[in-house]
Image: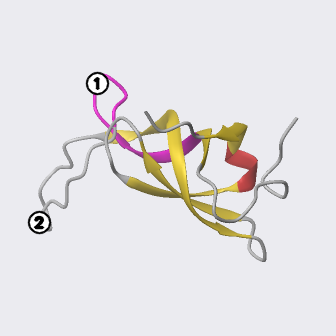
Amino acid sequence: MTTLNDITINESWACKFKATCWVDKNNKPVKSKPNVGEPHKGKPGIYESIGIIKVRDVENKKVQLIDVETKQEFIVSWDSCWDIDTVEWV
């Protein structure tokens, strides 16, 4: 089983991840910054997807990912990542 310690530089890697964020009724992330006093368009929840690893911070055990579905960036802990594998670009 590959871990985040095993990934090599100059190769593309991806993993499944989960992040706590604002989600809609379909459990998709909501990017919304309401004004003070306005309700948020989402609710707190757990979002799971696959992300391309952009930055791996070994010291702080964090990974910056680009979600393949929404193209949003997430920063998650190593504990929130699994199924790490190389990316085959087609």
Dot 2 crowding, Cα within 10 Å, few <14, some 14–19, many 20+: few
Q: Residue at x 75, y 49 (%)?
A: 79
Report the residue at 55% width, 36% height from top. Answer: 88
Q: Amino acid at mark 1?
A: Lys
Distance, label 2 to label 1, CA atoms, is 21 Å
* Residue 80 pos. (x, y %): 68, 45
Task: Indicate whether residue 26 is drawn in magenta.
Answer: yes
The N terminus: image quadrant:
top right
Q: Quadrant of the C terminus?
A: top left
Q: Is residue 57 left or right of residue 4?
A: left
Query: Which residue was labeled with disc 1?
Result: 25
Residues at discs 2 and 1 in contact (Cβ within 8 Å): no
- Taking 64 as reference, is 23 left or right? left
Please give left or right for residue 83 compared with residue 90 in the image.
right
Q: Can you identify the residue that label 2 sits on?
A: 35
Q: Residue furthest right?
A: 1
In depth, the one of 75 and 65 nearer the eye is 65
Q: Amino acid at mark 2?
A: Asn
Residue 2 lies within the magenta run: no
Q: Quadrant of residue 43?
A: top left
Relative height, residue 33 to residue 79 (above, below): below
Q: Magenta stretch: give its range.
A: 17-28
Residue depicted at 11% across the width and 66% down the height: 35
